[in-house]
Image (spheres, helix red, strand yellow):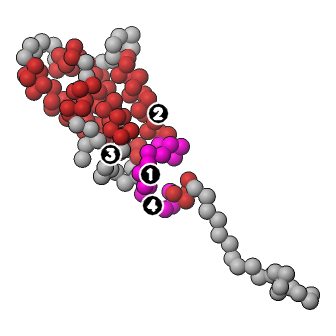
Amino acid sequence: MAYCTAAEVLDMLKEDMLNVIVGDDYIENEDERIQAITPIVEQAIADADAEIDGYLAKRYKVPFEKTPQVINKFAKDIALYNMVSRKGVDENDREKTYLTRYNAAIAFLTKVAEGRISIGVSENNTEDAARIGFSMSNSPRLFSRGSMKGW
């Protein structure tokens, strides 16, 4: 299950970037443009999902059955970057926004993988949960005031 849809990614993509991503030929008909870019979007989403799973697989059971909203947001950002970076990203141009959002997504995923940020999903196993939380146990007391009375 994908963490975002092609329609969500296309909604975030600026209109002038569609033809840049599809190729050098300008496609005037909007339906033809969407048809040409859909396989690229789907591949970018699959790559973004794999990248997210790679960061979170140690801590969470992936893919998520119900995608957390924050993962949906960052999946769209990573997919957009994957699409725009096919032609190269010019850091002095409009593509810098896509690079900045991608870097923010990777920084967030790194912190989640390290356990510094929670995304509100139960973790893989109790061993990881014990490492994050605090637990303490002890044996019953052998000596107490009652048992030592008279000594």
Residue in the image at 46% along x and 33% along y: 107
User: How far is disc 1 from disc 3 in space, using C-alphas?
Assistant: 15 Å
Q: Label 1 is placed on what type of residue?
A: Arg
Q: Are marks 2 and 1 in contact (CB under 8 Å)?
A: no
Tell me whether circle 2 and circle 3 mark residues in contact (CB < 8 Å): no
- The residue lying toward the viewer, choosing from 78 and 6, is 6
Circle 4 SS class: loop
| Image x and y of residue 34, in percent | 13, 25
Q: Position of residue 110 (x, y in %)?
A: 47, 39
The reply to whether residue 114 is in sight is: no
Residue where numbered disc 3 is placed: 67
Q: Is residue 24 visible?
A: yes
On the image, the x and y values in percent for residue 19 come to: 17, 16
Q: Which residues are magenta?
A: 112-128
Label ID, residue 107: 2
Q: Residues within 10 Å of mark 1 (few under 14, many from 20)?
A: some
Q: Residue at image x 83%, y 85%?
A: 146
Q: Earlier in the sequence, mark 1 or mark 4?
A: 1
Q: Quadrant of the C terminus?
A: bottom right
Of the image marks 2 and 3, the number of the one nearer the N terminus? 3
Characterize the magenta stretch by its predominant secondary structure.
loop
Is residue 97 shown in magenta? Answer: no
**Disc 1 + disc 4, Cβ < 8 Å:** no
What residue does disc 4 label? Answer: 125
Which amino acid, by three-letter code, is at mark 3? Thr
Q: Does residue 109 appear left or right of residue 32 in this picture? A: right
Q: CA distance from mark 1 to mark 4?
A: 8 Å
Q: CA distance from mark 4 to mark 3?
A: 19 Å
